[in-house]
Structures are given as structure tokens and as C-alpha cells.
Image (cartoon, helix red, strand yellow):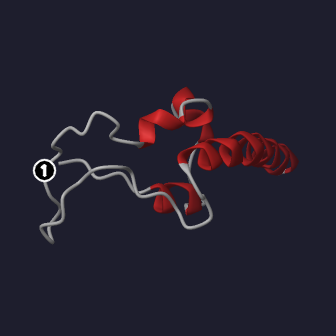
Amino acid sequence: MFIFNCEKLLSCVNVHLQELIPEFFYMPDMFTNCNGYSLGTNDDGQPLGDVVLPPWAKSPEDFVRINRMVCPALEVMYVIVRSCC
């Protein structure tokens, strides 16, 4: 079973931003199980549902908004660092 951890993904220094799917930047609905599908349970027996967002995101909409602000800036910094070496 696939368990998505946004905190680990976005805090990882080696993330290649071009590999994030476009939905990270415009579709907050992808982080919620709005249809109530049964997704099974995790190792602790807790039912899986919505994606657990990092503590700095107050909602899926906030998470998408921050991605739209931060990720392009990180990409520019990555290009600058790579071009100077």
C-alpha cells in the first residue's frame, strides 16, 4: 500500500522539482478522500483517508498555495547554484 508523506518529500534536499506532478500546484482536492473510499489501514490499524499534510499547511488549499510560491523560487535557486559551479 502506498502511503504518501508530504513532509518528507518537501523537506528532502535532493528532490527534483521537475518531478512533482502539476496537481501539486493547482489541485487541493487530490489530498482529500472526499468520496470516502476505504483505503485500508496503516501498520497501527488506523484507517487511511486524507493525506497527512505537514504542520505548516493549515489545509490542502494552503498547501497548494505554498507550493505555488516556494517551489518556483527553489527551482531558480537550484539553477543558479548549478550554473555557478
Secondary structure at numbered mark 1 = loop
Badge 1 amino acid: Gly
Q: Name the residue that disc number 1 marks.
A: 40
For the point 55% across and 36% down, the residue is: 24
Q: Tell me the residue at 13%/50% (across/down).
A: 40
Using residue 45 as the reference point, say whether residue 8 is left or right of it.
right
Residue 44 location, x and y as percent? 15, 72
Up/down of 72 relative to 8, above or below: above
Q: Position of residue 35 (x, y in %)?
A: 28, 33
Q: Position of residue 34 (x, y in %)?
A: 35, 37
Outermost bottom residue? 44
Nearer-the-camera pick, 9 or 69: 69
Q: Nearer the viewer, residue 25 or 35?
A: 35
The residue that appears at 60% across and 60% down in the rendered structure is: 13
Left or right: where 19 falls relative to 66: left
Q: Give the class, few, some or many, for how many residues have Cα within 10 Å of label 1's Cα (few <14, many ≥20).
A: few
- Residue 18: quarter of image: top right
Q: Is residue 53 above or below residue 19?
A: below
- In the rendered image, which quarter is residue 69 located in? top right
Q: How many marks?
A: 1
Residue under the image location 50 percent in, 62 percent down:
7
